Image (cartoon, rainbow, N blue to C red):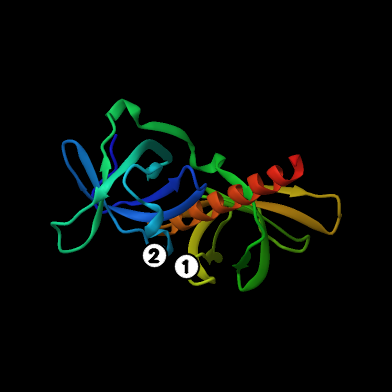
Amino acid sequence: MYPKVGQNIEILIKDRDYSCRSIIAEIGEHEILIAVPLNRSIIGMLASGTQIDVFFLEEENQYKFQTEIIAKTKDTKIPLYRLTKPKENEIIRIQRRENFRVNSNLRLIVNEKELVTINISVGGLLFSDEMDNILEIGDEISGTLYIPNPQNKDFDPITFSGMIRRVNLIEKPERKNIAVEFTNLTQRDQMKVIQHCFEKQRQMRLVEKDRRR
């Protein structure tokens, strides 16, 4: 299963352990063309021969394939990067959306109340709230999540709809953890969440390396 033209993708530069977002511009017989990544500071990293992983979403699943940069196009009005097209059986489904989860404390607004997430994935999030919160399993909610934007060092507000899937009491008797599954999140916002998850994983790997030294 190949990604579609116009679809948002996440690129992981393997030797730099660095990720960025792009868009599928064209799929040919032997090549895939992608737009210049949104993070302009990464352009110099995408030289010919650079090994990358490409991630994309399809319905409830995340897919991945390995490829390399062939070159930058010279015969198009808008510069594009040429990638080696993988065989279809080399594209693998790596996990369901809700399993790709990292610990992250992000600003969250639900029912006009300021909260902070405990963890997040492209499938949902977990937050803690006071016991007097009346949310129960099965309730539908809407809210705004603020995702760090690596390009301008600001935060992008993401509006979502979701459903309460789990409510658990925690050690402090006056609080409870509430798990939310996203039921409405645009693909563009999904890719923002994925990039944030990659960045958190990268930070955790760096911390782990420092501990081993």
Secondary structure under tag 2 reads helix
Percent of width and height locating residue 181:
55, 49
Q: Is residue 137 visible?
A: no
Which residue lies under the disc numbered 1? Answer: 151
Q: Is residue 109 above or below residue 29?
A: below
Q: Which image quarter is the C terminus in?
A: top right
Q: Are marks 1 and 2 in contact (CB under 8 Å)?
A: yes
Secondary structure under tag 1 reads loop
Percent of width and height locating residue 192:
47, 58
Q: Tell which circle, 1 or 2, labels the residue nearer the N-terminal end.
A: 2
Q: Please tell me how crowded label 1 is: few (under 14), some (14-19), or many (20+) other residues with Cα within 10 Å.
A: few
- Residue 93, by quadrant, is top left
Question: Image point 84% across, 59% down: which residue?
Answer: 174
In space, the residues marked 1 and 2 are separated at their CA atoms by: 8 Å
Identify the disc placed on residue 40. Answer: 2
Q: Is residue 36 visible?
A: yes
- Under mark 1, the amino acid is Gln
Q: How many marks?
A: 2
Question: Image point 39% across, 64% down: which residue?
Answer: 40
Closer-to-camera residue (163/202): 202
Percent of width and height locating residue 86:
29, 33
Q: Is residue 182 above or below residue 66?
A: below
Question: Image point 76% across, 44% down: which residue?
Answer: 211
